[in-house]
Amino acid sequence: MRSDPGEAASESALALPDKPSIAVLPFENMSGDPEQDYFADGMVEEITTALSRFKSLFVIARNSSFTFKGKAVDITEVGRRLGVRYVLKGAVRKSSGKVRITGQLVDAVTGAHIWADRFERDLTDIFALQDEVTAAVVSAIQPKMLQTEIELATRRRPEDRTAYDLSLRALQQYYLATRVGFAEAMRLAHRALEFDPRFSAVAALAGICHMVSVLLGYSNDPQFDRKEAIRLFRLALSIDDGDPDVLAVAAVISAFMVGDSEASIEMADRAVALNPNSWITWHNRGHVYRVAGLPAEAVRSFERANRLSPVAYLTFEGIGMALIELGRFDEAIVAGKKAQRQNPSHLPTYRCLASAFAHLGRVAEAREAASRVLELDPAFTISGWIGRGGKSNSKLLIEGLRKAGLPE
């Protein structure tokens, strides 16, 4: 008598990959119409494909996940049998011209629910609907998984540190967006490269830290940091020039540190083509087009990024700076204030607000924003800021900073 392969697989757990791993289970069809299974299955197919575009994730293929279709499953057992830490499950209900999709992201090791949400849309264009919900689900769960992974890494014992754990710790510091945080992120990223010199994502992260150090005036040796940023993005590309996140980082470093708009645009466009569901690919494309002097396309990219991550203050900053170059100063202020509310201590926000207020003749508000610029960067000068790179096409932004009374 032949044994059930499922039973054999459940006897021992597969080892978890050294990066976030996820299986998308077949969504339950709640419509009461078996013929609607195709829609639920298509939803899972779209989400699985979208997640697979993130090279930082290990995603179980559809054919393995669908062995659980129509079965009552234990999430912990699914995790053991498929060798994943995270499981996404959901349900679809179609009725009266509407579709409701619910999703839950579960930690298969602990059983903890990490994320849950519900999406309800008019059932008009079925394919556009699938694209819209897929983007919403993927843009929600990918950051949640990363956040959980970072928290896990910070709880591990120091002797357990690996290149991957060090990269997660570096990301945690990078997201603080402070001078100390960027410096620590840079240190941890370089340490991770010592463990794994072929870790393209961490080489890109180290490069962006060196770039930010130059752009924000944190660097004690801007020439060295500029060269390091360029060296590291080229190293990352030499390791893996097909990773959309690496391409996105390389594009923005090239734009700011090298000034090669043509090459930067080519990389940014390729990044979004490879993964149109990634916040970083669209966000960085926005900066690349802004630096290249194409603010309208920059705004379009930032708005796409904002749809994927509505609470990213960095994207609102980008929108604000691009809108200034389009002469849309009122809208730039709205975007700048959104960024300010989300992070009241980020220097570029106040440069944006100071310039936009000054262009509209709102002198008191412009001076107040300018004072915040000098409070956060006492040594700030317009000429020094221009010299850091990527400002040749920011003519109206610079003009506004002068009108706001910031030192030349």
Image: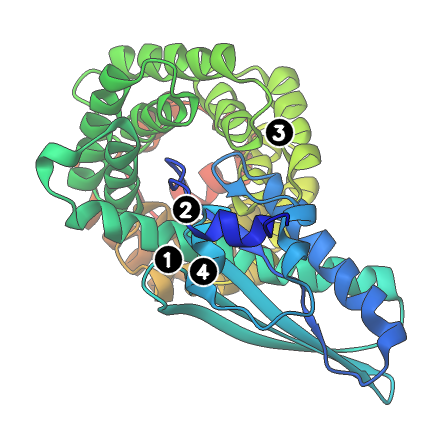
Query: Is residue 193 depicted above or below 373 in this figure?
Result: above
Tell me the CA gap for discs 2 and 3: 33 Å
Query: Residue 388 at x, y = what percent?
Result: 36, 23
Direction from residue 51 to residue 223 in the image, left or right: left
* N-terminal label among 4 and 2: 4
Q: Earlier in the sequence, mark 1 or mark 4?
A: 4
Q: Nearer the viewer, residue 220 or 395?
A: 220
Q: Quadrant of the C terminus?
A: top left
In the rendered image, the residue lying farthest to the left is: 158
* x then y, percent, for residue 93: 74, 81
Return the mark for residue 156: none
Residue nearer the viewer, 76 or 274 = 76
Give the quadrant of residue 98: bottom right
Residue contact at pointers 2 and 1, CB within 8 angstroms = yes
Q: Which mark is residue 366?
A: 1
Give how far across and how far down residue 161 sits, in percent.
18, 33
Q: Earlier in the sequence, mark 2 or mark 3?
A: 3
Residue 268 numbered tag: 3
Q: Residues within 10 Å of mark 1 (few under 14, many from 20)?
A: many
Residue for badge 2: 403
The residue under label 1 is which amino acid type?
Ala
Tell me the SS state at disc 3: helix
Camera-near label (2 vs 1) is: 1
